[in-house]
Amino acid sequence: MLPILLCVPLASDCAPPIAPIALVGQPTPDGGSLSIVVDLAVNSSGDWLVVADTTATTNIVDDVVLSPTGVVYTWGQSFAEPPGSTLIAVAQELQLSDDGVVMALLLLDDPAALPSYGGLHVGNTLVLGEAEPLALAPFAPGSTLDAGSDLSLVSAGKFATQGFITQPGMPGTISVLITATVDPKTGALQSLAVPFTEGDTLGGGQVIGFNQYSPVLNEAGQLAFSALIDPPGPPAARSALFIDGQLLLEELTPAPGVGVTLSKLGRFDINASGQWAARIAVASSSDTDGVLLVGGEVLAREGSLLSGNPALPLRTISESPVFLSDVGNVLWAGDLGLPVPSGQRRALFVGDQVLVREGVTVVDGATVTQLDLGSDGFAQSSSGRYVIFEAKLSDGRQGAFLVDREPSLASPVAGVTALFGCNPLASCLAPTGGSLALGASLQLGLAGGQSPSASPFLLLADAPLFTLAPCGLELPGIGELLLSPAPPNPFLILPGNPGADPAPFTLTVPSTPGLAGVPVWTQGLFVDSGPQPLRLSNALELLLVT
């Protein structure tokens, strides 16, 4: 057993590290400087893309796309197809897959034809351009396809987009959804299908168009999309959400988990396992109010308290995108209500926890003063580990910032590994000094109590608990249990010193030679009289060393 000794308070911080990655005023390769961030993307390796304007040109379009390794696209860049064309703008359809493929809708200056030419590109290779010849049943011979108005890219070159098909001798165009595959290395188109078209019957109504929100393709090949359907007879046409043609949500019908009419379908997402999330509005006595659904269950509702932060009332859920990670974490934006002071209300949330908040979150010693929560102001990797967002800081810096939600804790202590699970942390356990050598002692700090009377505890176990690696057992309102309580060795609970935050713990390592190389797992717990009586922290794996 590892006995506990008291010691003086020690500093501890598990806040996810936030790093500036593209700041207004920094030099850009075109000879100018970055003037404004326009769009963002991030993948599960922490690679990112930032679309920005620069001062090098007077045009009012997006001039440059930056990555950790340099420039991906820049205004005036030459392209082989169409011959002699140059880049005018990067449309706000930019995707970065987990295997590093970049796909974008680019607007080119084509001197041989139209003054501008739009097309989907993988790197510098044109995949689908304007009026692309289409030989695909049931469309008439000689049909053409214009694609790229919304885009979703996953691994192995698989993507989905909206488009329009023109058939010879027929008036107008047909709105369609497209799924396709390209060679990730060459950008060569390998397959193309049109699974859904205007005129299809879905959800008991005829599809009369596809909504402005992008279709979402997951790694399993499932396609989530919203469509405008017109059922027979009254009431009028309405929007509906589908996965592979199966109806999930429909306006003017009862909303799941709420019991009142769904009045407006908003942004949505689907993860690799087919779980979905959607922002909706429902009819209420106050006209409408926003609700965030995850798999048909209510995660958040305007005017209610967030379950993970009972002291923080939710005023509004932003109509900006929602991002659902493969482990079920939802990134979304909103505003807190009274009594939260003005200037501290706007926030990014992961699940029911605040991730970044105006007036509260600190980056390199400066406070976040303004978050951009628009349609292109933030994004999340499919793993949920990385979040990228636009913000202004109190020291005048503004631009794009990257959050790593699963950092390795910076510590001089060999043998310590941090385990963060899959849910935002309410409290933090971190090594603060000492050693795991036999006969030595290790100092830990547990931070995140809600009041001076909070009682800190350490849980110790001989095994971790992972129900779906790297996740533990989610305990709503408490956190995520990452240690195994299974017999024959249920975890040991060690009390700490109330009143200190961070609460200090010292673990004395026995001198027994046979313990070298043996792992022990520990997790922090606060017991409090506050609105969240129990609060779990992250866990630490402690590998005893010689």
Image: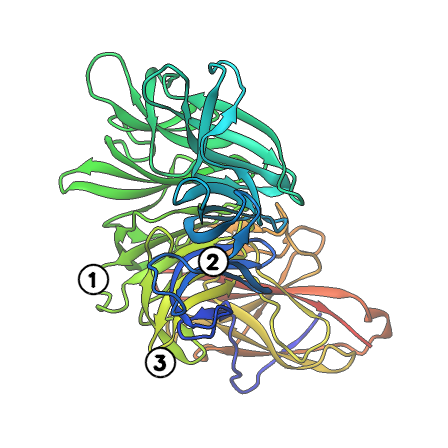
Decide if residue 182 is in sight here.
yes
User: Disc 2 designates what residue?
Assistant: 76
Residue at x-position 53% and y-position 83%: 10
- Count the numbered circles shown: 3
Decide if residue 278 is in sight here.
no
The Cα atoms of the two marked residues, 2 and 1, are separated by 49 Å
Q: Is residue 339 above or below residue 381?
A: below
Precedes in sequence: disc 2 or disc 3: 2
What is the three-letter code of the residue carrying label 1? Leu
Question: Residue 242: x, y in percent?
Answer: 41, 28
Question: Residue 452: x, y in percent?
Answer: 38, 76
User: Disc 1 designates what residue?
Assistant: 338
- Between 385 and 14, the one lying in front of the other is 385
Q: Nearer the viewer, mark 2 or mark 1?
A: 2
* Quadrant location, the N terminus: bottom right
Tag on residue 395? 3
Q: Is residue 408 above or below residue 351?
A: below
Q: Quadrant of residue 461?
A: bottom right
Label 1 Cα neighbours within 10 Å, binned few <14 / some 14-19 / many ≥20: few
What is the three-letter code of the residue carrying label 3? Asp
Tag on residue 258? none
Precedes in sequence: disc 2 or disc 1: 2
